[in-house]
Image (cartoon, helix red, strand yellow):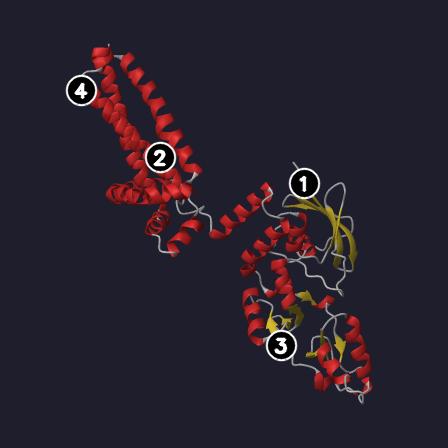
């Protein structure tokens, strides 16, 4: 038996199998390292001029070619190693089922341990550094196998289309990848919930419009300019706001904005009494913006005009509400409280689960506070979501179930939902 094993032709084939197993290990480890490498770190190294990082970035940008080349090379060496091992056992044990079975068992163990588990375990422990080490060699292999990989891709994509599968769908955007990473760190305790919400706010601000963050006209403090100046000034000072819109002949006709600083400048003159201040002269012009304006565009406009306050109107010019710089910043950093803001948030969490919610709370704010996933594409407020889904104006005590949550109308005033009880449904 030993003499058969030590035959020259068998020793040569054993050496070739060892080399092929090494190549298989290289392919497996390279695949894991390159697919698990951090695109953010590679991008940073690429910006700093690292040539290996530039190659890795190119490979990651053409994943189909990368995986096709690596898998093609891996399968070629594994099949060739299996054929040689079968030949070795045939020379030792003779032809028949015993040689074939022995070759199968030995190659399965060798490939599993030394060409799959071991290299992939090593690669996953340090994917970035290994990806940089193998980048040049893998890039060469991918180029060599490119024509064959292209043919294989055409066949695969054509087969998938026959079954109605789009091979380009399902890829994650950078935003989704960041959100997934942040959520994972939150679960592991590596990041606070408030920090998670702020990161989400930065990522999602581009998707929001002024309409979704504005203060609705129903909740806006407005003053009739035709009442005595003394009363106007008192109302402004008692409102707790630094800027208050002034209207004439109806609240839809906003003619100016009164700033507390301008009032203080006027009354700082000892000779002037409140009743003699002409509010029309000291009020500022009104800045009107469409409700469909994106938050990013409005934020830039606030910065350029050095303004903090704008009146929101619809396509017909009707008053919808107001938006401030603070409203936009709160979408990123969370609620900003000062000494004049009310402490009541409108969310009363219940011991048994769920919460009593004020109807005019935005869906986004509720999701942040409760950690829920209510959809906010079709409705801005919680009350609006219920009305949209039910396609009706609900009555008190009426209950609905949507998107895995149960909504119960608690209080209603005319056609407006004042408060709701919302519970998550656990199956």
Q: Is 314 rendered above or below residue 190?
A: below
Mark 4 packing: few (<14 Cα in 10 Å), some, or many (20+)?
Answer: few
Mark 2 and mark 3: span between their CA atoms?
Answer: 62 Å
Ranked by sequence position, the earlier of labels 4 and 3 is 4
Query: In the rendered image, which quarter contains the C terminus?
Result: top right
Residue at 54% x, 49% y is: 179
**Which quarter of the picture shows residue 415?**
bottom right
Which residue does the numbered mark 1 point to in the structure image? 425
Residue 405: x and y in percent read 67, 45
Q: Earlier in the sequence, mark 1 or mark 2?
A: 2
How far is disc 1 from disc 3 in space, using C-alphas? 45 Å
Q: Label 1, label 4: how many angstroms apart (C-alpha)?
A: 70 Å
In this rendering, the answer to whether 20 lies above or below 270 is above
- Quarter of the rendering occupied by the N terminus: top left
Q: Give the residue number, with chain letter if any, for mark 3.
A: 287
| Residue 9's disc number | 4
Would residue 70 be found to the left or right of residue 250 on screen?
left
SS for dot 3 = loop
């Amino acid at each position: 038996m030993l003499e058969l094993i030590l035959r020259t032709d068998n020793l040569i084939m054993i050496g070739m199998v060892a080399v092929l197993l090494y190549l298989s290990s290289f392919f497996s480890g390279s695949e894991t390292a390159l697919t698990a490498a951090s695109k953010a770190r590679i991008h940073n190294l690429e910006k700093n001029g690292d040539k290996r990082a530039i190659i890795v970035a190119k490979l990651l940008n053409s994943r189909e070619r990368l995986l096709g080349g690596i898998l093609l090379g891996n399968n070629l060496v594994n099949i060739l190693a299996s054929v040689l091992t079968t030949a070795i056992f045939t020379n030792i044990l003779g032809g028949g089922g015993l040689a074939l079975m022995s070759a199968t068992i030995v190659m399965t163990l060798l490939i599993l341990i030394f060409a799959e588990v071991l290299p992939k375990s090593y690669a996953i422990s340090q994917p970035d550094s290994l990806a940089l080490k193998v980048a040049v060699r893998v890039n060469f292999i991918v180029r060599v196998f490119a024509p064959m990989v292209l043919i294989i891709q055409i066949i695969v994509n054509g087969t998938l289309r026959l079954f109605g599968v789009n091979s380009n769908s399902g890829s994650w955007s950078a935003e989704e990848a960041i959100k997934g990473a942040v959520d994972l760190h939150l679960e592991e305790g590596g990041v606070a919930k408030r920090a998670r919400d702020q990161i989400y706010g930065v990522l999602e601000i581009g998707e929001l419009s002024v309409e979704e963050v504005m203060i609705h006209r129903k909740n806006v403090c407005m003053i009739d300019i035709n009442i005595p100046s003394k009363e106007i000034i008192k109302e402004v000072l008692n409102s707790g706001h630094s800027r208050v819109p002034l209207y004439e002949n109806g609240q839809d006709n906003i003619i100016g904005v009164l700033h507390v600083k301008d009032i203080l400048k006027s009354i700082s003159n000892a000779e002037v009494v409140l009743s003699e201040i002409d509010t029309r002269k000291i009020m500022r012009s009104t800045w009107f913006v469409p409700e469909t304006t994106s938050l990013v565009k409005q934020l830039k406009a606030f910065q350029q005009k050095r303004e903090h306050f704008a009146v929101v109107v619809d396509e017909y010019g009707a008053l919808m509400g107001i938006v401030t710089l603070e409203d936009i910043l709160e979408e990123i950093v969370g609620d900003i409280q000062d000494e004049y803001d009310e402490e009541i948030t409108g969310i009363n969490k219940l011991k048994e689960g769920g919460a009593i919610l004020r109807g005019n709370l935005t869906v986004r704010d509720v999701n942040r506070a409760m950690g829920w996933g209510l959809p906010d594409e079709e409705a801005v407020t919680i009350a609006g979501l219920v009305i949209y889904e039910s396609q009706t104006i609900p009555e008190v005590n009426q209950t609905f179930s949507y998107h895995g949550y149960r909504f119960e109308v608690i209080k209603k005033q005319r056609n407006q939902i004042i408060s709701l009880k919302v519970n998550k449904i656990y199956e």
